[in-house]
Image (cartoon, rainbow, N blue to C red):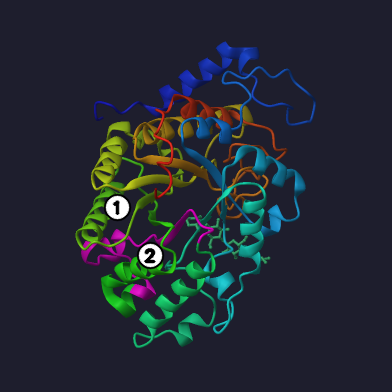
Amino acid sequence: MPKNRVPFGRRAFLLGLGVLAGAGALAVADRSEDGTSRTTLTMSGEGSLRERATRKSLIYGAAARYKTLSTDSDLAASFVKECAMLVPENELKWNVIRAQPNSFNFAPGDWMANFAKKHDLLFRGTPLVWYKSFPKWFESKVTSQNAEKMLVEHIEKVAGHYAGKIHSWDVVNEAINIEDKNPDGLRNSPWLKFLGPDYIEIAFRAAAQADPQALLVYNDYGLEYDTPAETARRNAVLKLLERLKSKGTPVHILGVQAHLLRRGNEMSDFNPATVKAFLDDVASMGLKIMITEIDVTDEKLPKDVAARDRIVASAYEDYLSVALENPATIGVLTWGLSDRSTWLTKNKPRADGAPVRPLPLDAQLNRKLAWQAIARTLDKAPERPSQHQTRT
Ligand code: G3I
């Protein structure tokens, strides 16, 4: 085992001990699951994640869906309380915004942009270019002859529509897939097939033209664990970023998704030194870093809610402690705010049928141990210079 790797079981045990030792002082939720009230004396105080992050000139935010945010006023109120940034989970994807080939459906995205403005939230876009979530017409209409035109036109229209309202755009999402065995680890996306590796540069240049103020992000997953597969992914991402930078491509941020425990309980493969070295390499290229989609899959964790919540919180704390230490990291976004609305309900359901608990707030919008863990890592994070999370 590498020197700095901490056996996960031991960390979970220690966290468990901490929780027990804190007893009343660490009671996490304002109300327990059955709705009965409980004395709350949290270790890290009552300030929201937004306040804690802002104190350090960091951003805390979350993804949300139009349908949820526009109909669930309690969730919307929690969102505004905890978050400084809103990310539409699906509303700016091709299958929504380009459901029809010759028109653009900006309505759900516009509603979310207005919600963000009204509540003083930064607004972030994802993704302009991805290998999935295409509309049905895409396959029959896009060819190697018109792909560049389609790509650039899409970026001009969408990034142009939101120009001036967007903090950052995931210009290219998930371009690496080592299993496809292409040179440089690039994924077999339609864009690679039609345009070759240059599609990435083309996309960034078009985005910079369409919205000169937005920070432009390359976003990817599978960069957390000290396994051969994720080491290969980290190396491929670094090479891609180096190539882009060497050509003067306007890329400003690496977005690290950080969907933790995707395969089970693999925090035993978490090595802080590996993540630190990777993020240092990214920062040394002059790039900022954003943790863009963090959540913790609890599919294979114990059924006992208290035990499960401790492991989930511990994963957040382990990862974010390292990520927020890097001065180039400008913010943390969870992929959803409350367990009542998360992609994992559908995509990684538990075999025992128990509701999943991957996010900072539970389904009743109470703060969980995961919230505490994020709060602590924000409190411990070194302060950044003000404005470092924007282009200026
Ligand atoms: O909106 C329709 C709804 O009308 C319909 O009733 C329902 C039937 O299943 O489908 C709904 O759309 C689904 C949508 O999620 C909302 O639930 C889509 O089929 C489904 O494909 C979509 O999945 C999203 C997925 O990306 C694919 O776009 C997830 O919500 C979203 O969380 C997930 O997010 C991705 C990031 O963009 C990139 N990184 C990984 C992350 C998780 O996979």
Residue 197: give x, y in percent of width and height: 27, 70
In this view, the residue in front, 269 or 292, is 292
Residue shown at 57% from the left, 43% from the top: 84
Residue 18: give x, y in percent of width and height: 52, 16
Magenta stretch in the rendered image: 164-191
Mark 2, residue position? 208
Residue shown at 47% from the left, 62% from the top: 127
Neighbor class of circle 1 (other Cα within 10 Å; few <14, some 14-19, many 20+) is many
Looking at the rendering, in which quadrant would you find the N terminus?
top left
Residue 144 in which image quadrant: bottom left
Q: Is mark 1 within 8 Å of ligand 1?
A: no
Q: Nearer the viewer, mark 2 or mark 1?
A: 2
In this view, the residue in front, 314 or 371, is 371
Q: Amino acid at mark 2?
A: Ala
Distance between the alpha carbons at the discs numbered 2 and 1:
26 Å
Residue 290: give x, y in percent of width and height: 41, 45
Pointers 2 and 1 in contact (C-beta within 8 Å): no
Q: Which mark is residue 233?
A: 1
Q: Is residue 228 visible?
A: yes
- 166 versus 37 height, above or below: below
Residue shown at 36% from the left, 42% from the top: 224
176 magenta-colored? yes
Secondary structure, mark 2, is helix
Q: Is residue 133 visible?
A: no
Outermost residue, top direction?
21
- 161 versus 233 height, above or below: below
- 158 versus 383 height, above or below: below
* Residue 275 located left or right of residue 72: left
| Ligand 1 falls in quadrant | bottom right
Q: Which mark is residue 130?
A: none
* Residue 291 located left or right of residue 31: left
